[in-house]
Image (cartoon, rainbow, N blue to C red):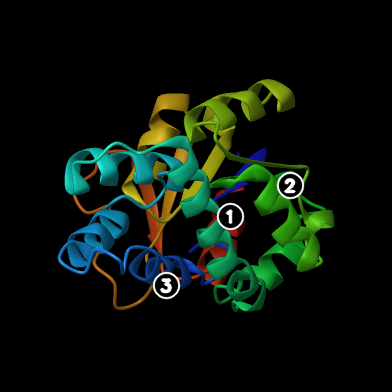
Amino acid sequence: MISTIILDFDGVILESVTVKTEAFRTLFSFVPEHVDEIVQFHKDNGGMSRFDKFQYIYKNILKEDLTQSKFNELSKKFVDIVFKEVIKAPYVPGAKEFLETYHSKIPLYVVSATPEEELIQIIQKRGMSHYFKKVFGAPRKKAECISEIVKLTGSPPEYVIFIGDAKNDFEAARAAGVRFIGRIKPGDENRFSGLYGVEAVIPNMYELARYIEVHQ
């Protein structure tokens, strides 16, 4: 039985992962000797908030102190780069149909590493707010948000599924004790290969709908 569905945003609802990858490349173009390493770190840590990534990049790659003013500057520039592009990003195949079909059947929630206020604005601009019971974002950790949803709904954790596209998403689901389905864009490496506890790996949201039909 599935009583609650929790969705990551980038790479699960919208095909916006590439937008944010290119934003990191643009944002750190002032250190060209490190930019490839920074972009790779970003790609390897999908599901981590940009705030945590900035901290890591400065401490471990640039080996500089990240002042509050520089942090604020990076955050503002990042939003300036990505916001309009995410608004225009296409849906993951099947995502719009999935939301339209299932929002009235099973409670849907969003848990993302995108800052919560920004995420809510994007969802409002896209006209998607009515699909979701509640939207959760950074700076709160995903596992914490998932656990709160379990408490809010009163659902047994084994009836709750989180759909994500990163290993960090799987780890958040495991920490919160809920089920996990991974989404891998066709042509991308399967980041969930060999991870025990991944219930299924899907290429698009049409397949998620089929999975739910069979297992509901």
Residue 144's place in the image compared with 139, above or below, is above
Q: Residue at x 40, y 44 (%)?
A: 48
What residue is disc 1 on?
212
- Indicate the quadrant where residue 146 lies: top right
Residue type for callout 2 = Ile
What residue is disc 2 on?
106
Q: Position of residue 86 (x, y in %)?
A: 60, 70
- Indicate the quadrant where residue 150 lies: top right
What residue is disc 3 on?
18
Q: Are marks 2 and 1 in contact (CB under 8 Å)?
A: yes
Nearer mark to the viewer, of 2 and 1 = 2
Nearer mark to the viewer, of 3 and 2 = 3
Q: Secondary structure at mark 1?
A: helix
Residue 211 appears left or right of 127: left
Number of numbered tags placed on the structure image: 3
Q: Residue furthest left?
A: 33
